[in-house]
Amino acid sequence: MKKKHRNIFISVLFCTAILAVPALFFLQPKKSFSEREKRYLAEAPELTSQSLRSGSFTEQLGSYVADHFPGRELFVGINAYFDLLSGRQETKEYFSALGGRLFARPVDTDLRILNSNLDSINAFARDLASTEADIPLSLMLVPSSGAVLLDRQDYPDGAIISYAYERAQTGEVDLLGAFRSFSDPEKLYYRTDHHWTSEGAFQAACVYRRSLGLPCPSREEYTQQRYGPFYGSAYAGSGLWLSAPDSLDLWYSGKLIQVSNETGRANNGVFYMERLQERDKYTVFLDGNHSLVRIENLSGGIGAERNLLVIRDSFSNSLGCFLADLYDKVILVDLRYYKLPLTELIVDEDIDEILIEYSVDNFLHDTNLAFLSMDPEPLRQKVEEERRPPNYYAPPQKLTDDFFDGAYYLGDSVDGILSYYCLHNGKLRNTTIASNAMLGYDELAQQVRKHLVYKGNFATLPELLEAEDPKMLIVALGCNDLARADVEPTTEAVAEFLNLVRETSPDTTVFIQSVMPIRVNLDIFNQGEVDGLNTWLKEHAETYDYCYIELGQYFKDEKGQMAASYSYNDTHLKPSAAPIWYQQLMNGGNYYHFPEQYYVEYDGVTNQQLEKAVAAFEEAEPDAFEEEPQKETVLDQIYARICEQISCPEMLELNERTISSYLGLNPEDFRDGRFYLCANNLKADEIWLVELENEDAVQKMMDRARERILVKASSYELYLPEESEIARRGVAVAKGNYLALFLSPDAERMRDIFLAALED
């Protein structure tokens, strides 16, 4: 009987164990990221007929189950320690030696990639040499910790480094020899990570400087602070969870350092201290991997002023912290993310040295060095310019209208007065000025283009850029984004927007105009925030090769706010400000980081502009342009009657070019037309009066008019809801071959006047 009960108990226990595992699998919360293994876990696969046929569903399901198996990390650790005790762990990606220190196994040599990377470096070296610029190019290959610390013949780092240095047309930085002869080499690498320590990065910086005959700092110039615990990449990949952690030593030089990256976010100092709260504390150095990092030493480097460009991998996160103390400026480029030629960086940042830093492992397997390139011509021209006689090139003191031919002026309601002024005075005739109700940079950056209107319809920014293909883009910011967010989120959104412009239209030169001042401090934002955004715009423009235009200063009072004499309301200028706006837009002194391709030549002795005369600008009167008078038509008479009987706001009559670019209408599709838009973009008022050829043309124009009502209403929906409602109640009416569209609080009365006029 007892035996029977025991068998039953064992059977129940066995069945419970079998059922418990799948039950735990489905009931336990699923993590997307394993902090211990420092990797993202597999997601649940989507079951489709295609995934079943291809077999990908089964493969993805296996990965998903393996990554989320109950107690997975425990079993991974048990397996790792079993391998360690049985002597099989050295066949794994990471193994333990020297008292628990974790090492990566020797790298596999891929001669194809190695030779390809050397070819890329040598091609770059030849282009650089052809410019005759005195810029030394050095190659630094970082040996693995196993090659330095372990007395083993199976680490090929030494042979690979010798092979590369013999063939590279660069200077060489012998880290392997220096590290092996260091008094305590175990201090050069972490125990649980493949990277070097701060001590290792400091020694590497000194070895590099000595290779060029430049002075090095002393260790005594630094103070150190220790943080921990730190578990590195080797810990995450080994499964040896009982390994003792490392600590991070941060070396402080006391110098004033400013760091920024491609996001536009600046940091005081090379350490991002908030990263110490995360599992991967190594990102405390320069915020981890970024495509482009710019480090400026405001205290000045050691010796003569020098700027350094580093083509790097992740080892330069900590190396860059020490190079920052030695140079006035250090630019770090990671070719895994940065694919552009390096020409502009070398020229614009006045680079004096170039260092290519790669770990041996990355140099054997990373193919992104194929993107290492430059166009030698701009640097060659710079070298020639430095040797040229007294004449020099600089931004023009005064611009003429044709400077902006082919430009696209993208703004919001604040820019309506400039558009009105230019159209009626013949200014910027070959410039498309788009004054939309709301630009919404945050929405633009996220591919939601609800408020960007192009040719009468909503469009994405890439669609607009591809259609216009502007040689210049003038981005005129308003206060809309500040009204919805603080300065920092707004700068992040603007940076995303400008990156999108550069990605979509890389040949377009971007000008960023300052935000205009506001009349009073509002509840949602104030003049201090406007000034803060303008300061960031100016710095961002210089850092990322845009041109900043400072115009707001001309409309401020003694308090630094919008002057009452120019104020239409709290956030918009009067039309009387437009001539000053235009005049200062033509003033080259208001441009910062002016595009060098548009420089003009000056006489070095007289400082007079040599090539392009500026007399045309100086002699032109604001209202000198007059359009040829048109013969009065039925449409003119109807519009005059409407204005006599109804008090309309100041309206802007669109010309043939703006009818096409702004409304998306082809003048060939109608016999005659008058199109009026409120000169103040704060109002939705709009009038169409059109004469067409036949009934089919009338119906097509009616469809466009109804579509216009929807577009106009939507464009004001979040910005000015009351104007959106006015547009939504717009009236489109046709009689015979005549059609009218009225967007106005008096749209019904306008319709009656229109119909009555056609009866007369």
Image (cartoon, rainbow, N blue to C red):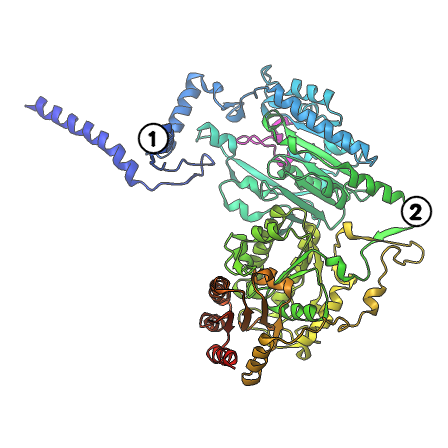
Amino acid under label 1?
A: Leu
Q: Residue at x 60, y 51 (%)?
A: 467
Disc sitting over residue 52 in the figure? 1
Residue farthest bottom in this picture: 645
Residue farthest top in this picture: 153
SS class, disc 1: helix
Let me know if residue 257 appears in the view. Answer: no
User: Nearer the viewer's eye, disc 2 or disc 1?
Assistant: 1
Closer to the camera, 152 or 316? 316
Classify residue 547 as left or right of residue 750: right
Disc sitting over residue 666 in the figure? none
Where is residue 559, by image quadrant?
Answer: bottom right
Closer to the camera, 509 or 92? 509
Amino acid under label 2?
A: Pro
Reply above or below: 185 against 291. above
Reply above or below: 313 against 587. above
Where is residue 217 drawn, in percent x and y? 74, 39
Closer to the camera, 615 or 606? 615
SS class, disc 2: loop
Task: Mark 2: give few (<14), some (14-19) or many (20+) Cα within 10 Å.
Answer: few
Let me know if residue 338 appears in the view. Answer: yes
Residue farthest left in this picture: 1
Where is residue 190, by image quadrant?
Answer: top right
Closer to the camera, 185 or 662? 662
Q: Which sits earlier in the primary sequence, circle 2 or circle 1?
A: 1
- First to last magenta residue range: 184-199
Circle 2 sits on which residue?
389
Where is residue 275 drawn, in percent x and y? 54, 46
Residue farthest right in this picture: 605
